[in-house]
Amino acid sequence: MDIKRVAIDAVTETIVMTVVHMDYKGQVAKRINEKMPLATVKGFRKGAVPKDLVEKQYGKAIKQEEVQKVVDLALERFVQSERLNLLGTPLPKVNENFSWDAEELVFEYEIGLVPNFTLDLDAKNDIVKYVVTADDKLIDGQVERIQKQFGTAIPQEVVAANSDVTGTFANEEKGINNATTIAADLFKDKATFDLFIGKKVGDVVTVNTKGLFEDDHQLMDVMKVSHDDVHGLDVDVNFTIEAINTAELAELNQELFDKLFGAGTISSLEELKAKIKEDAENQFAQQADQKLLGDVTEFLIESTKFDLPAEFLKKWLQTVGEKKLTPEEAEVEYARSEKGLRFQLIEGRAMAQSDIKITFEDLKTFTTKNIRQQMAQFGQTNPTDEEVQGIVARVLSNQDEVKRLSDQVVAEKLLELFKEKANPTTKEVTYEEFIAASYGE
């Protein structure tokens, strides 16, 4: 057999395989001999059919099967021996003039190659690393929410200015159907809450989403609107009132502090505020890290130039998956996934250049940390090592979980690498300023 590579461009090639009789005749003969005792041809007893008739009846199909086996194995070994780094899988090229009766059978496979490119992680950039602080307004608001949450709800007949109103926002067209509790300070225009004043349980109040909140992103929390839909959303939503209460605020005393954080953890309002600030800023730090990773990702995608085997990948996309795509659908799918593919290649190059590897110990340490955090959220602040490791072992016995957690470990290691290499400018902001910087508002 003769196998060679023919370059189409820097990232697309054709593998040409020429198969001759010697490559498959022995296996075909063996299969014919195996078939003879089982062959049935009219006019002959089973097992007594002459060999030439067996070859005539079954030979063509056996030849095609055996040749394909030879081709598949040779293709696999060739890709390995040439150390080809493929995108997608080889695609057979259709040859209208192909004949199984030819002396030489020529098969062609188109392949897409991972591009060769230079990744400069130290490139000059204007990336900002945000340090988000919890200001007094945020902390005081959280203290009040805690007092309301642990206070006493006093049912009311009608909505008043100081009422907490529980109900459901709904808009069938936008798929909005979310139960929540609202108060006068929720809305951007305080006069909006006047629409609720005097209403009773069962009444419906209609408001418009446009400019309803100080930050449109509150639509994601209050109405469970997706991020893609929040910007400029301008629809009417109906709020059906289900309960009306005023809150008798809980006292800020030791009983409440112990309820919140465990006995003796904090003992004053000042310590409560410090704890709220610490927890909030830890959460903000995670969000800031995600933004930093996103900003570095965008920068690297834009600044790292390389060609992809686009036309090959569009054809390949038509062949994978349960539902075969049309050329038009494949075009759309490629456009949707191209940026992700580019970063996947950049990510791999960054890991290789920086010799980043994921060990089982890395995975175990990361999983242990996650389990402890989750247990703490449910009030289990001091689990034993034995309890935690038992859960870790169960989690890591699930291959899907191992894959998911491995991806998170990779993202964490890459984030640390990008922080070091990108050398971003640090900027301290409030949470409101961070939201504005994140969403351009």
Image: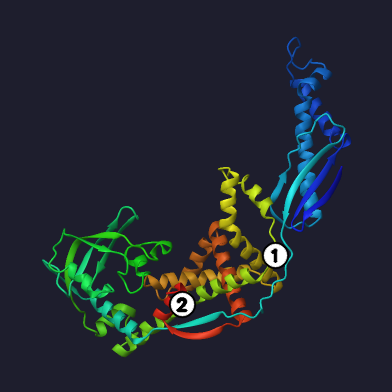
Is residue 283 visible from the viewing direction of this image? no
Q: Residue furthest top?
A: 43
Residue 169 on image: x %, y %: 27, 60
Taking 62 as reference, is 349 above or below it? below
Taking 263 as reference, is 41 above or below it? above
Left or right of residue 220, residue 95 in this image: right
Tell me the residue that label 2 is attached to.
437
Q: Please, what secondary structure does the residue beneath circle 1 have?
A: loop
- Reading the chain from its start, which is encountered first: label 1 or label 2? 1
Residue 355 on image: x %, y %: 70, 73
Q: Nearer the viewer, residue 215 or 122?
A: 215
Tell me the residue that label 1 is attached to.
306
Q: For residue 203, which quarter of the picture?
A: bottom left
Look at label 2 and name its amino acid. Answer: Ala
Please give the name of the residue rendered at 68% of the width and 59% of the height, measured from the top-left corner: 308
- How many other residues sit within 10 Å of disc 2, few (<14), some (14-19) or many (≥20)? few
- How many other residues sit within 10 Å of disc 1, few (<14), some (14-19) or many (≥20)? few
Is residue 87 visible from the viewing direction of this image? yes
Q: For residue 178, which quarter of the picture?
A: bottom left
Contact? badges 1 and 2 (CB < 8 Å) = no
Q: Which mark is residue 84?
A: none
Left or right of residue 137, residue 76 in this image: right
Look at label 1 and name its amino acid. Answer: Phe
Please give the name of the residue rendered at 63% of the width and 63% of the height, measured from the top-left corner: 342
Residue 118 on image: x %, y %: 72, 70
Taking 21 as reference, is 200 above or below it? below
Label 1 to label 2: alpha-carbon separation: 30 Å
